[in-house]
Image (cartoon, rainbow, N blue to C red):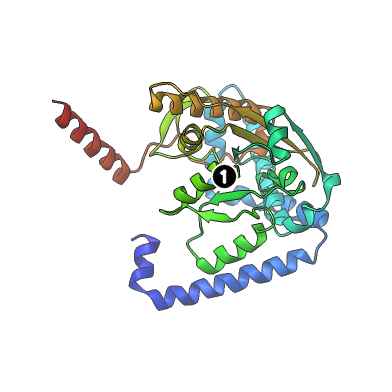
Amino acid sequence: MSRKKRQRKHPKRFAIQNRIEGVILNAAVFLFRLIPVDAASYLMGKGWRLFAPFNARHKRALEHLERAFPSMSEGERARVVSGMWENLGRVAAETFHIDRLLRQDYRFEAVGDETTNAMLDGKQACILVSFHSGNWELCVQPVVRRGVDITGVYQALRNPKADEVVRNLRKDLYRGGLLSKGPETARKILATLKSGGIIAMMGDLREARGVQVPFFGQMAYANTVPASLARSCNVPIVLGRVVREKGVRFRVEGQAITVPHTDDRQADIQVATAQMHAIFEGWITEHPEQWMWIHKKWAPPGKSLLRRQQNRAAAVNSFNS
């Protein structure tokens, strides 16, 4: 039984559980903000490096790394995944200090092409697409520190109390608003882009309802939303990455791509989505220990989605016959 079904069946019990989890998360935020960010990041990173290998996802990360780099030695894979856990621990601690980090320009170096620089100056509407590497939460920092408002798109947490805490931590990043995925989100995104604004979203997660593109020599499911929106609104996509240089210091880079605009809309979206992932692959190869290898990027669709896809294909074939 899914969590949503259990919530509907026992609403009072889950309301209490949600409230308790929210209180615990608020307490964690309060405590970690008492620790200077450099110390908090260091301690959390070392803690995750030490204890995360006992998590079941550690094995999954090693398997995914082997799929991506089959010639990499077992010892090197272990080193990379340990580095991944340390980076994730640092990200967790740094998230509690986002508002402070935004004001500390000395921690950031920004590098971008002409389109990226126009975006930084607030002169270019675009979709800013990042991926889970370095501290991806801070990818928008160079834009925010220049006073440009950004609208973010994110996946809301199932616990509304915990989601409220997370939203509050990110509010200084997305002064244009933080939109959870839902029916009204697409309309708000289109309005923002058409009015010259910037939309930020993640682009490396598996999306079985999307398309398959090459990724480390294998076909992987990819989200087509960034390319679809960019094509519809005739705006570029700026791919952003955050490279952790040392401790709590970062290099933020931007690289723009343009979605093709031919008579074949689906083909245009496929090409642009594949191009995005080719760039992600190159960036991940440079710093594999900073990417989140626990993503099920190459996993096949679940049974329910696969059944819907098959039914949709059968309906199309029946119509065409």
In this view, the residue in front, 184 or 273, is: 184
Q: Position of residue 313 (x, y in %)?
A: 24, 33
In the rendered image of this protein, does residue 263 appear above or below residue 157? above
Q: Is residue 130 at least partly visible in the picture? A: no
Q: Position of residue 126 (x, y in %)?
A: 59, 37
Q: Is residue 61 at least partly visible in the picture? A: yes
- Locate the C terminus by quadrant: top left
In the rendered image of this protein, does residue 178 appear above or below residue 304? below
- Locate the N terminus by quadrant: bottom left
Residue extending farthest right: 106
Q: Position of residue 91 (x, y in %)?
A: 69, 50
Q: Residue at x 83, y 51 (%)?
A: 104
Q: Residue at x 44, y 25 (%)?
A: 268
In this view, the residue in front, 225 or 19, is: 225
In this view, the residue in front, 127 or 277, is: 127
Quarter-of-image position of residue 127: top right
Q: Residue at x 62, y 30 (%)?
A: 74
* SS under mark 1: loop
Quarter-of-image position of residue 120: top right
Residue extending farthest front: 195
Looking at the rendered structure, the kind of residue marked 1 is: Ser
- Mark 1 is surrounded, within 10 Å at the Cα level, by few (under 14), some (14 to 19) or many (20 or more) other residues, namely few
| Numbered marks: total | 1
Q: Residue at x 73, y 46 (%)?
A: 141
Quarter-of-image position of residue 3: bottom left
Q: Position of residue 187 (x, y in %)?
A: 45, 49
According to the picture, the residue beneath numbered tag 1 turns out to be 195
